[in-house]
Image: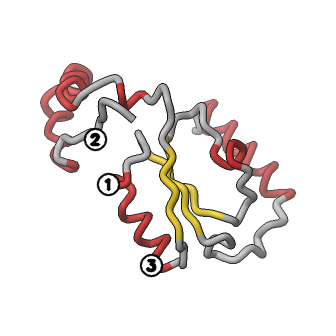
Amino acid sequence: MATPIQQNLIDSNKSYASTFTSGHLALPPAKKYAILTCMDARIDPAAAYGIPLGDAHIIRNAGASAKDALRSLIISEQLLGTQEIVLIKHTGCGMLTFGNEDAARIVKGNLGDAGVEELAAFGGDFLPFSEL
């Protein structure tokens, strides 16, 4: 059974899909660029930068980390023909508010030692930064 959030997403997607007419767009981005930006829920990159559907790859992660997005950036450039990568960071980013030790302490408090062990999957480096 779907949670209320899941059901809302399913219903919204059904509505969107029923009127979607852009399936003819090519797989590679038409304008041959990729944007890497933060996953901050307050940011809508397409609206903020006037990017029409199909023009660019938009890659998002915590803090707009190129290291974290490297796999996607390589696929975008090497396999799908992008020629420019635009990195967009923003003021008020949550990644400015903690260090690796802080994050590990919170994970341990919430999930215990088993949670801390899972941090090995990415070396326990949350890729925080102290200035933009």
Q: Quadrant of residue 3?
A: top right
Relative to residue 72, is residue 26 drawn left or right? right
Name the residue located 78 percent from the left edge and 75 percent from the top edge: 24
Disc 3 target residue: 78
Residue 123 picture location, percent across and down: 16, 47
Q: Amino acid at mark 2?
A: Leu
Left or right for 69, reference 103: right
Per the image, label 3 sits on a secondary structure element best described as helix
- Furthest-front residue in view? 132
Local packing at callout 1 (Cα closer than 10 Å; few below 14, some 14-19, many 20+) is few
Q: Position of residue 113 (x, y in %)?
A: 13, 30
**For marks 3 and 2 on the same chain, the one whose residue lies earlier in the sequence:** 3
Q: Which residue is the site of mark 1? A: 67
Up-down relation of residue 11 to residue 58 (above or below): above
In contact (CB < 8 Å): disc 2 and disc 1 = yes
Residue 108's x, y, as percent? 19, 25
